[in-house]
Image (cartoon, rainbow, N blue to C red):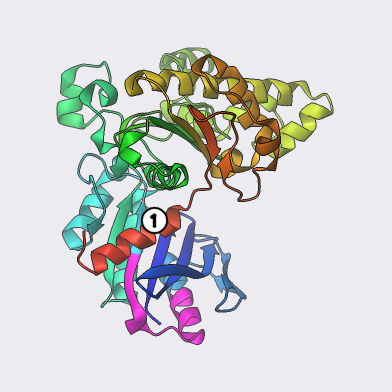
Amino acid sequence: MKAILVVNCGSSSLKFALYALSGDDVLEKRASGLVEGIGTAQGRFKAKGSLGEAETVLENPSHLSGFGALKSWLEGAGVRDDEILGVGHRVVQGGAVFSESVVLDDAKIDQVDELAAMAPLHNHAHALGMREAKKAWPDAVQAAVFDTAFHQTMPPKAYRFAVPSELYEKHALRKYGFHGTSHRYVSARTAEILGRPVESIRMVTAHLGNGCSCCAILGGKCVDTTMGLTPLDGLMMGTRSGATDPSVFDYLERKLGWSASKTVQVLNKESGLLGISGLSQDMRTLVAARAEGHEGAKLAIEMFEYRLAKTIASLTIPLGGLDALVFAGGIGENSYVVRGEAVRMLAPLGLELDEEANAKAVGGAEGKISVGDSPVALVVPTDEELLIAKDTLALARGRK
């Protein structure tokens, strides 16, 4: 069996998926799992799929021991080292350095590490994982697929901040955008569903999960997106505030004595749906609580829906109109309540909700949830791991 291994190394976890090749380089997921609790006294290795299931305790787990556990499990499942053609690494921040997926060498891994100033919780862990994966599978092509790469086609008027040019020119202060792998996948899949070239569709894609972002896609390329220098900007999210007046930092320092890092922590971890509801970051919990009269849940959902619809409408400006609105991510794929209200608010754009189709489009279902042919609203479940596997395979075959 020839296979592609996809890994996502975080600061406290290592997620993976194994794709086997069949036929004309068709990729089939055979296993997935994670190592959790990295950096703690005790963690776990978990795996499931057609290769079997496993769950074991790991003492003092690290990225090194995590890859060791993964390699041992694969060997036990009959996957030899020489059958791993490539290892695809998901990378949060590629900055302006990486505009496409690349084959990794030591210099590129160092570049990924250097970009950690803009993604301190992610890029150091990514680089560490890349180095360990090279040791574990030295003959496999190591590839990086960047969340930011898809957004590198934005024009300066979209990605520049209105700050002194020196901050951009010397310190790379600008919008980068994230969830690019998801936006790229669902836009291509939307074109397949509609039977049209992706270049012909004026599209807004909405990746809605614990993290949320929207992307305006014209000619098959990103022309604007909502996340900024970091994933904190843009839409209201599970625990992130989204766009907020920057003066909040000075205000909270003067009123409460908070440092900038304290405010960033609150805006990232204690805000959004969780902060407004005072109850949960989980949309399912909030919808149920609202039905029982919970006022915090009600306000949190209303704010989320309002900001989402307002943002989608604004992204039609760079598109010059709208042909397709696409929902993806955990909320986008499953919360027909949120989707429904967003589409209703977007009626001025010509969208009309198909109530029955919207209610049925949950649990991995894909398809149209609006009435009429233009514009259309669709649900398209994202598959970032598959896209990473495809890019890695192409790089391993020398096709990119």
Left or right of 261, for residue 159: left
The stretch drawn in magenta includes residue 244: no
Front-most of residues 239 and 257: 239
Residue 180, position as x, y percentages in the image: 37, 42
- Secondary structure that dominates the magenta span: helix
Where is residue 178? Give x, y as percent: 38, 39
Magenta residues, start to end:
68-87
Residue 177 in picture, x, y percent from top left: 35, 35
Query: What residue type is disc 1 on?
Result: Leu
Screen quadrant of the N terminus: bottom left
Identify which residue is drawn at 20% across, 31% down.
171
144 to 47, vertically: above or below: above
Dot 1: element: helix
How packed mark 1 is, by other alpha carbons closer than 10 Å (few <14, some 14-19, many 20 or more), is: some
Residue at image mark 1: 387
Side (left or right) of 166 relative to 340: left
**158 sits to left or right of 374:** left
Residue positioned 29% across, 44% down in the render: 149
Which residue does the image show at 47% across and 21% down from the upper left?
311
